[in-house]
Image (cartoon, rainbow, N blue to C red):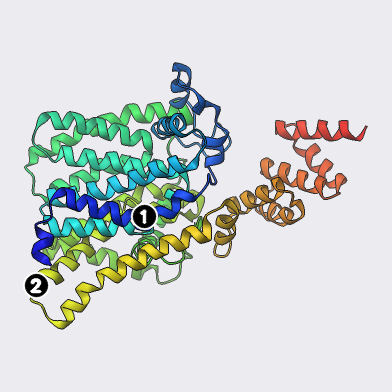
Amino acid sequence: MTKGSQDLSRPYRLLAIVALALVAYWPTFQVGFLWDDHVMIETNPALREWSWQTLKHDFTTDVFEGQGDPYFRPAATLLSRVDFTLWGLKPFGYHVTNWIGHVLNAFLLQELAITLGFGNLVALLVGCLFAVNPIPVEQLMIVGGRAEIFSLTFVLISFLLLLRDERWSWVVGYTAFATALLFKESALIAPLVLATLYAYKKAKPSTYGRLLPCFALIIPYLALRDHAVGPLLPSMSMRYLMKFYIEAFPKVLFLYARLILIPWNLHSHRMMPHLSHAWPLALAIWTGAIIFLIRKKHPVVLLGFTWFILMLLPKTPIMIYGNFMLDHWAYTASFGIILLLAVGYAALWKGRHTRIRYGLGLSLFPLLIFWALLVHLNVALRGTDETMYRWALHFTTSHPIKYNLGVLLLTTGRAQEAIPYFEDVRAAYPEDNRNLHALARAYWETGHPKIALDLLERIQAVYPPAFQSLQTIKASRR
């Protein structure tokens, strides 16, 4: 079994990934457009044509056209335009594209493992485990999740090319890194992760010079992004930042590590974990573990931990000012944990065969089945907008989720049911004009015209849609 695994060539390793990813994720092909897809794809006129005007539009505005968070994702929009050209508004094709991206990432991680010297067996295990892990299930159900998937794809391509010694590969690697940035700003951390890979391979000091063009590319990217959607980071006090990274981030790391290994109860908008007086213990554990690994020279474990931590860092600004976590943020970081798991299984299979080692080694197969079944379960529980929102609200108090569910109920003729959700959001954000407008519509449709008119009168001067609704209501009462 071990020898056969060691002799597996690249095509067979790729076939294993494709087969496992298909078994795990084929239910996502049957999901419709969800959540952000309605704005980014279904009602997005910019996807309907190829022209210099639409291409310019992709690089000068956010993906929500001012109707949501200011996300700068021009490469993701270009890919969605390709899908629209091929598939129109049939979700199947878009989901297949995202699935292909996930398969590519599993394959590229296999190649990275081999490049780092881990051998075919560890590479095979890395690809198989990554292919079925449920962490990215939401990214494959929501077409808009392709930004995270393909950003990682091009980051991995850049790593593989910049780890080579041929100069031509560096040029292509820098191009891949720039493309990754245009998919998602999380790729900004890539140069630091690449430096970690150089350190693991004990590269010559001159090798680190390859990082300089990466840092140089970040400057025009940030300028372009700032011009299109504004600054990357909100203003934050240094004291608050330090408090987060010292007290909260260690606990966040434990939570994400647990979700990668035991991805039970995945849901949207997980609230930040409450801090307790035990936070120094979490900080001490992570700090002590890293110091121990450095002193005892355990490079593989140190590589896994460093990858895991660095890949989560770009998500921390949203954790800080949004006070929530998204499970799929662990997607890019998961390789750090999965690599260690793969190395452990490989050691069990290659070592002296005892009953205990044999049993532990065979546990890989139930793990793969368990993870794949969890993907199916997640799609069954969260495969529509309404089920996704309702499932999340079993575990989170997220106000964006409440607002989204309220709008869905309102637009499907259930205004009375929508009102409590809008009122909850109103209690937390009394100046949220978009929510007040939706609440006014709900009250109007449930026979409370006075409340509706009062709300619309209050916000009409600063929220144009409210003014239009008010005029429509007044015209209908004449």
Furthest residue toward bottom: 355
Q: Secondary structure at mark 1?
A: helix
Q: Position of residue 370 (x, y in %)?
A: 36, 68
Identified at 41% across, 35% down, the residue is 76
- Compared to residue 348, the image places residue 342 above or below, namely above
Q: Is residue 280 visible?
A: yes
Residue 244 location, quadrant:
bottom left
What residue appears at the point 53 percent right and 42 percent down from the top-left corner?
A: 36
The residue indicated by pointer 1 is: 330
Q: Is residue 242 visible?
A: no
Give whichever of 274, 123 is nearer the camera: 123
Position of residue 105 measured from the top left corner of the image (x, y, whole percent):
28, 47
Can you say whether 84 is above or below 423 in the image? above
Image coordinates for residue 170, horizontal then vertical, percent: 16, 32
Report the quarter where the C terminus lies.
top right
Mark 2 = which residue? Answer: 351
Q: How many marks?
A: 2
SS class, disc 2: loop
Quarter that holds the N terminus: bottom left
> Which callout, 1 or 2, points to the residue nearer the camera?
2
User: In the drawing, what numbered circle is on residue 231?
Assistant: none
Q: Nearer the viewer, residue 431 or 298?
A: 298
Is 322 located above or below residue 69 in the figure? below
The Cα–Cα distance between marks 1 and 2, rounded to whole angstroms, is 31 Å
- Neighbours of disc 1 within 10 Å: few (<14), some (14-19), many (20+): many
